[in-house]
């Protein structure tokens, strides 16, 4: 068995070597040849800077001494050109002077905080997301950071899970496109350029599907769903050149992913020929003991390295026990050499052996931090992330005749909450709040008065009275409600994602004033807010939009920007409906999606309509679009000849606008039950008032393929529905094709 594994491992090494630079390989080998076993294991050890722990610290090491003695290959949570230079200087005191890699969670911006990734995904604007990752990379790379632990590419179908904020929503196709854009943005023109950071596709794999939405919980999933839904964004990140992968804190079908040979050796490094390295999640090697999958640190270290995990993040199992496991013959030294080579290769590729300080440049750091473009990019990304959910009587955009605005709510003037969780923690908060944004835009032409009204969760209603009296004296009421930034993110799963009662009650009382009410919902996840959705005339989902939040919201409220974003996660009507997503597998007793229909003996709930509150792909604009004239270049797909689908899109309103048009396909009869529809294409089309254009989609093999029972990606003959929609639930044009093979 061991011998077989070793052969497999050698084959894997040979494919790995092929596409890479022989020069770097020679250099890696020359360093490897000089290294003692302890020095090799040092390269596999990643420790956290104590000042900013992002997980439970395990203690037991002296960071500075460990760096000086070559016992650390990488640090996380140390940042800033000055600090990273000081630490790198310590590494230069070690015997072989191997430079450190500095990693950090640059999740949504570095010095400039950008919208949370889930918000940004609602722009469906790949160029924009690439640009925002680029901005983050430029700033981070000037500040000593070589490596971001992003993008998170986990598909998220359960908004109770707090980390939905970090990913790109529920759809594998859109998630894959976004994964590519983000990897490209982070890695720019390529590793080695001083404005590029290594991307890290995480958390490999299926971390986004923990039971009950509880962070760190088990994932029990069919191979079919794994391949068809959860793995595609990882493959896309790899194809875009992601330098590294992170495994995770979950188990998948009983095997912790950190010790999962199937995922790491068989799929990622085997079938997909991944040439970079895999880092564990924080402490996840050691946590295999708590999972009941490893007996002790020694066993955990042996299992993780054998499964393909190259670097141990803050687990200290490799540092403590791997050398002994090699000496005992439990772990072949070739596995260590392979892991070390993968890491050293990246250090060469980043140019760190030529100049270990090339990314810690205080002058460049200050330039990148203060570049006037930063704010403009952040504002553009933020306004393109805002989803208009409801706009009765065309209350928005607000006209310049509004003279008095009552701005109310616990999040209307909260700087800290605009940045959202998982931002880089800077001592001062730069965010523009809604209050700042409105007052700045309106100057003294409009009176903006502000009252908090209540807190996010505290049940006190003491502030209602003054908020209400202020509201009564205003032309319009804007209320900002939702979650604080501490309510979503890692370890922030919630069992109840409804808007806290106190906030809903405040909105109810404000509505009773008879004045027009606009609700802004800031959150890190889809929330449930049925009363607001059903009774308030205007609702904007404003997520956590980062530094430029208030300016972006003002842009949308006054029509300087016409909202174009569409939801990338289905919004449930009730917590009991979760997990809820548009691309569910067909059932033998489908529910009617027509509201109010009798669904007896049909899938669904007896106490709830089948439909979610807002479907995937939904979002309004200040203008309207007409879809017409669907035409297909052929109705038969044969010999792999792609089919062109085209239709006419017309802006039928009075404003310039952008429409995200969506192509869905349904495989009618397949060897494995298929989703009721699956997104296979989208475009964001810009049109002036009255303008119209022809939109084209190409249907190729990839758009028609499925995973069969043997997990082979195949196209099967038969009929396929072709649907063009304004959302997953608003199909405007429909046709069929027939696949002949
Ligand atoms: C965490 C997260 C991971 C992150 C890492 C480092 O526990 O799960 O996503 O990159 O620690 O901060």
Image (spheres, rainbow, N blue to C red):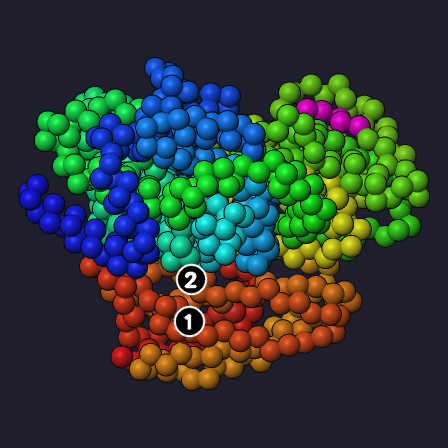
| Of the image marks 2 and 1, the number of the one nearer the N terminus | 2
Q: Which residues are magenta?
A: 451-456
In the image shown, does 618 or 501 lie closer to the viewer? 618
Query: Which image quadrant is residue 1 in?
Result: top left
Q: Kindly tell me whether residue 633 is visible in this rendering.
A: yes
Label 2's element?
loop
In the image, farthest residue toward the bottom: 634
Residue at the spot of label 2: 677
Task: In the rendered structure, find residue 721 and report the number of the disc placed on it.
Answer: 1
In percent of width and height, residue 733 lies at 53, 72
Q: Is residue 73 left or right of residue 548?
A: left
Q: Are marks 2 and 1 in contact (CB under 8 Å)?
A: yes
Magenta highlight: main SS: loop
Q: Residue at x 71, y 75 (%)?
A: 691
In the image shown, does 320 or 565 lie closer to the viewer? 320
Q: Identify whether 191 is placed above or below 77.
A: below
Q: Residue at x 36, y 68 (%)?
A: 702
Q: Is residue 453 magenta?
A: yes
Q: Residues within 10 Å of mark 1 (few under 14, many from 20)?
A: some
């Amino acid at each position: 068995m061991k011998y077989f594994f070793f052969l497999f491992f050698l084959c894997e090494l040979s494919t790995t070597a092929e596409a890479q630079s022989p020069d770097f390989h020679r250099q890696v080998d020359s360093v490897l040849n000089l290294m003692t076993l302890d020095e090799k294991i040092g390269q596999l050890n990643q420790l956290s800077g104590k000042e900013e722990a992002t997980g439970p610290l395990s203690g037991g090491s002296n960071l500075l001494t460990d760096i000086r003695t070559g016992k650390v290959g990488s640090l996380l949570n140390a940042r800033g050109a000055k600090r990273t230079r000081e630490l790198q200087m310590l590494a230069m005191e070690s015997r072989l002077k191997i430079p450190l890699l500095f990693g950090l969670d640059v999740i949504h911006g570095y010095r400039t905080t950008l919208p949370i990734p889930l918000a940004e995904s609602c722009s469906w604007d790949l160029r924009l997301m690439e640009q925002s990752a680029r901005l983050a990379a430029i700033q981070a790379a000037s500040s000593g950071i070589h490596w971001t632990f992003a993008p998170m590419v986990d598909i998220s179908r359960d908004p109770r899970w707090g980390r939905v904020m970090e990913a790109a929503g529920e759809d594998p196709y859109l998630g894959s496109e976004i994964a590519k854009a983000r990897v490209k943005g982070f890695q720019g023109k390529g590793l080695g350029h001083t404005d590029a950071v290594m991307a890290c596709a995480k958390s490999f794999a299926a971390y986004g599907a923990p039971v009950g939405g509880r962070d760190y919980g088990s994932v029990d999933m069919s191979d079919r769903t794994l391949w068809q839904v959860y793995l595609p964004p990882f493959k896309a990140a790899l194809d875009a050149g992601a330098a590294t992968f992170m495994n995770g804190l979950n188990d998948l079908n009983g095997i912790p992913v950190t010790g999962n040979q199937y995922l790491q050796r068989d799929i990622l490094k085997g079938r997909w020929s991944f040439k970079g390295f895999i880092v564990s999640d924080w402490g996840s090697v050691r946590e295999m003991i708590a999972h009941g999958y490893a007996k002790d640190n020694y066993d955990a270290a042996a299992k993780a390295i054998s499964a393909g995990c190259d670097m141990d993040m803050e687990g200290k199992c490799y540092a403590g026990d791997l050398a002994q496991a090699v000496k005992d013959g439990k772990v072949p030294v070739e596995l260590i050499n392979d892991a070390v080579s993968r890491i050293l290769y990246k250090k060469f590729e980043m140019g760190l052996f030529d100049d270990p300080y090339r990314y810690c440049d205080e002058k460049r750091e200050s330039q990148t931090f203060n570049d006037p473009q930063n704010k403009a990019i952040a504002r553009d990304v933020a306004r393109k992330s805002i989803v208009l959910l409801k706009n009765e009587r065309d209350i928005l955009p607000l006209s310049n005749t509004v003279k008095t605005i009552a701005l109310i709510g616990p999040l209307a003037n909260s700087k800290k909450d605009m940045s959202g969780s998982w931002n880089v923690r800077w001592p001062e908060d730069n965010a523009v709040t809604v209050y700042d944004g409105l007052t700045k835009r309106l100057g003294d032409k409009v009176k903006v008065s502000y009252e908090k009204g209540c807190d996010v969760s505290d049940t006190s209603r003491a502030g209602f009275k003054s908020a209400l009296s202020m509201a009564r004296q205003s032309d319009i009421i804007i209320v900002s409600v939702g979650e604080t930034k501490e309510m979503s993110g890692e370890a922030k799963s919630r069992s109840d994602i409804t808007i806290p009662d106190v906030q809903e009650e405040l909105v109810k009382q404000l509505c009773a004033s008879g004045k027009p009410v606009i609700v802004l919902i800031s959150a890190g996840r889809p929330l449930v807010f049925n009363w607001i959705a059903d009774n308030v005339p205007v609702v904007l989902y404003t997520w956590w939009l980062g530094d430029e939040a208030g300016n972006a919201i003002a842009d949308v409220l006054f029509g300087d920007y016409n909202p174009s974003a569409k939801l990338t996660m289905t919004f449930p009507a009730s917590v009991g409906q979760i997990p809820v997503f548009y691309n569910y597998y067909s059932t033998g007793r489908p529910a009617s999606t027509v509201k109010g229909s009798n669904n007896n003996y049909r899938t669904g709930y007896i106490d709830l309509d089948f439909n979610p509150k807002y479907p995937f792909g939904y979002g309004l604009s200040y203008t309207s679009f007409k879809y017409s004239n669907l035409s297909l270049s052929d109705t038969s797909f044969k010999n792999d000849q792609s089919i062109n689908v085209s239709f006419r899109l017309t802006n039928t309103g009075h404003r310039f606008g952008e429409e995200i048009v969506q192509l869905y396909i349904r495989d009618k009869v397949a060897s494995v039950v298929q989703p009721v529809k699956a997104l296979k294409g989208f475009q964001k089309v810009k049109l002036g008032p009255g303008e119209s254009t022809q939109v084209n989609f190409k249907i190729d093999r990839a758009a028609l393929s499925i995973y069969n029972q043997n997990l082979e990606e195949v196209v099967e003959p038969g009929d396929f529905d072709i649907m063009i929609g304004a959302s997953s639930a608003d199909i405007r044009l429909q046709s069929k094709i027939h696949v002949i093979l």
